[in-house]
């Protein structure tokens, strides 16, 4: 059994350098693999697509539904209640091609009201819904919304 001695050894010091030769060998192999596989990835397959003589499709009819802050509904600019809205939605769903229902909702409308309107549209058979927003310049004229003041972050001294 060998034990450590308290007297210093007089021999060669251990080598503390990293042997870079195996690392360079691995990197060169990876470089060769990448150089061989790069042309395989960039090769394209030619596909001859058929030419269409038909005119481009016409955009679908757009129906507007406005939901106001108090939950009031307007179908195509006319006031409507929920039962009249359901009847309008069923009539719209029967059209071919299916129209696009553009929902213009006020920013303060509760989610519940929008969820009910979307549910009514889905039950009527309308599957194409869109939400319409106002341009940024139109919102600048809107009255400011009162926000709760935010306190500045506190920093802790070390």
Image: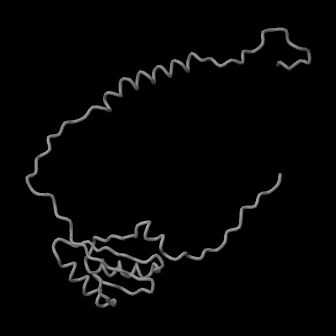
Q: Nearer the viewer, residue 52 or 63?
A: 63
Q: Is residue 90 above or below residue 132?
A: below
Quadrant for residue 86, please give it: bottom left
Residue 64 spot, x, y in % from top left? 29, 77
Q: Nearer the viewer, residue 18 or 139?
A: 139
Residue 11 spot, x, y in % from top left? 81, 8
Q: How is the image coloured?
A: one colour
- On the picture, is 37 further left or further right than 29? left
Residue 29 spot, x, y in % from top left? 45, 21
The N terminus sits in image quarter: top right
In the picture as drawn, the residue positioned furthest to the right comes out as: 6
Q: Is residue 6 above or below residue 40?
A: above
- On the picture, is 2 further left or further right than 79? right
Q: Nearer the viewer, residue 104 or 43?
A: 104
- The count of marks equals 0
Residue drawn at the location 36% of the way across and 85% of the way down? 73
Residue drawn at the location 45% of the way across and 24% of the way down? 30
Q: Is residue 91 above or below residue 48?
A: below
Quadrant for residue 47, please give it: top left
- On the picture, is 15 further left or further right than 94? right
Quadrant for residue 131, please give it: bottom left
Residue 102 spot, x, y in % from top left? 31, 73
Residue drawn at the location 30% of the way across and 91% of the way down? 83
């Amino acid at each position: 059994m060998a034990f450590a001695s308290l007297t210093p050894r007089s021999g060669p010091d251990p080598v503390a350098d990293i042997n870079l030769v195996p690392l360079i060998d691995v990197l060169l192999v990876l470089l060769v693999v990448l150089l061989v596989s790069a042309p395989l990835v960039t090769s394209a397959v030619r596909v001859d697509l058929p030419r269409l003589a038909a005119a481009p499709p016409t955009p679908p009819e757009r129906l507007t539904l406005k939901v106001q802050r108090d939950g009031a509904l307007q179908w195509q600019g006319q006031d409507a209640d929920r039962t009249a809205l359901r009847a309008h939605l069923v009539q719209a769903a029967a059209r071919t091609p299916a129209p696009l229902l553009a929902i213009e909702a006020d920013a303060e409308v509760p989610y519940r009201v929008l969820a009910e309107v979307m549910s009514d549209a889905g039950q009527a058979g309308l599957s194409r819904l869109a939400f319409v927003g106002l341009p940024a310049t139109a919102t600048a004229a809107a009255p400011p919304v009162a926000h709760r003041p935010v306190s500045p972050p506190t920093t802790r001294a070390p």
